[in-house]
Image (cartoon, grey):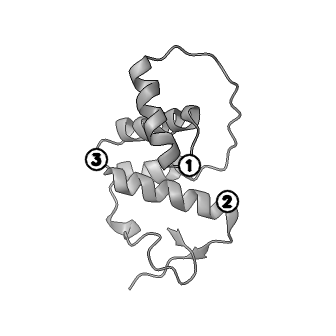
Amino acid sequence: MYAKKGSGEASDISVCLLTSAAKHCIMQLYATEEVFMSSTAVRLSEDIVRTAGVYAPVNSRSVPKQIEHWIKIGKIAEENPDLPYEFIKKVLVAREEMKTEKPMPYVFG
């Protein structure tokens, strides 16, 4: 697990205590393989689009990006039902931090 130097909060979960499903999730999220996506028109219910329209500005996202975010979280949660949402969210945040900053090993204790 990696954290920003001096942050102390990026991840306070000991890797040795993680379930095998959690380890699998982390390995999937930290994969270095780039995925290129193409845009495709998809029909969604008005209710989903309306709800995404409420949440999108709160999270500084466009409506399509908000829906993509929900799909990503839902897919990870469905594949790893024993992982809590907050853990999934912290792993995604840590992944983005690693893209923008030089990671420092997390020191436990």
**Residue that sits furthest to the left in the current view:** 82
Residue 32, above or below 44: below
Residue 27, above or below 70: below
Residue 20, above or below 107: above
Label 1 environment density (alpha carbons within 10 Å; few <14, some 14–19, many ≥20) = few
Left or right: where 4 falls relative to 78: right
Q: Which residue is mark 1?
A: 60
Q: Secondary structure at mark 2?
A: helix
| Mark in front: 1 vs 2 | 1
Residue at image point 41% right, 31% down: 51
Q: Is 20 or 60 nearer to us in this picture?
A: 60
Indicate the position of residue 30 as horizontal and vertical percent values. 57, 53
Left or right: where 108 falls relative to 28: left
| Mark in front: 3 vs 1 | 1
Q: Secondary structure at mark 1?
A: loop
| Residue 82: assigned label | 3
**Residue that sits furthest to the top in the current view:** 43
Residue at image point 57% right, 43% down: 61
| Residue 89: assigned label | none
Which corner quadrant of the image does residue 74 belong to?
A: top left
Label 2 environment density (alpha carbons within 10 Å; few <14, some 14–19, many ≥20) = few
The residues bearing labels 1 and 2 have C-alpha atoms spaced at a distance of 19 Å
Whether tag 3 and tag 1 are in contact, CB under 8 A, the answer is no
First in sequence: mark 1 vs mark 2? 1
The residues bearing labels 3 and 1 have C-alpha atoms spaced at a distance of 29 Å
Indicate the position of residue 77 as horizontal and vertical percent values. 37, 41
Q: Amino acid at mark 1?
A: Ser
Q: Is 49 or 26 nearer to us in this picture?
A: 49
Q: Amino acid at mark 2?
A: Lys
Q: Amino acid at mark 3?
A: Asp
Indicate the position of residue 45 as horizontal and vertical percent values. 43, 16
Residue 72, above or below 24: above
